[in-house]
Amino acid sequence: MALSSPITMVRNLAFMAFLLVLSTALSGCGVNNIPTYEENAKAKWSQVLNQYQRRSELIPNLIKTVKGFAAHEKDVLTSVVNARARATSLNLPAGAAPSAE
């Protein structure tokens, strides 16, 4: 069995040390950030759900407003039609028809 030269042994030890340092550095890369990212995603999703809830609560108010306005429009239109009918009808006594000259 041949003995390795001291330079080769130093290179091998240096390479192994480099691999050890590299693997240690990469093993913790970003692992601690995962819970933070997950919490941020949950917080943003809850904001989306809050907006959905707020919008769904506005729909009944919108429906009530439209129904109220429709009822008001119906009353106004009925009043206008009745007033126009009264204004355009001729209430002449019987036999007092206007003469056509």
Image (spheres, helix red, strand yellow):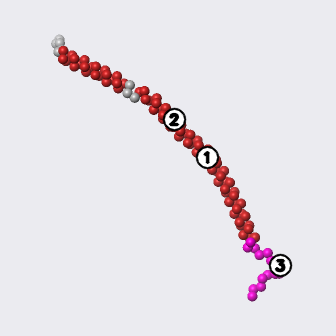
Q: Amino acid at mark 3?
A: Ala
Splitting the image into 4 quarters, where does residue 5 fall?
Answer: top left
The quarter of the rendered structure image containing the N terminus is: top left
Residue 67 location (% of width, % of height) = 67, 54
Mark 2, other Cα within 10 Å: few <14 / some 14–19 / many ≥20:
few
Query: To which residue does mark 2 refer?
Result: 43
Distance between mark 1 and mark 2 Cα atoms: 23 Å
The residue drawn where x is 28% and y is 19% is 17
Q: Are marks 2 and 3 in contact (CB under 8 Å)?
A: no
Q: Nearer the viewer, mark 2 or mark 3?
A: 2
Q: How many labels sit on residues? A: 3
Residue 13 location (% of width, % of height) = 25, 17
What numbered label is drawn on residue 58? 1
The residue drawn where x is 71% and y is 66% is 80
Q: Main secondary structure of the magenta part?
A: loop
Q: Is residue 54 magenta?
A: no
Q: In the rendered view, tell whether residue 32 sits above or below residue 10.
A: below
What numbered label is drawn on residue 87? none
The residue lying furthest to the right in this view is 94
Instruction: Tell me the magenta residue range.
Output: 87-101
Q: Are marks 1 and 2 in contact (CB under 8 Å)?
A: no
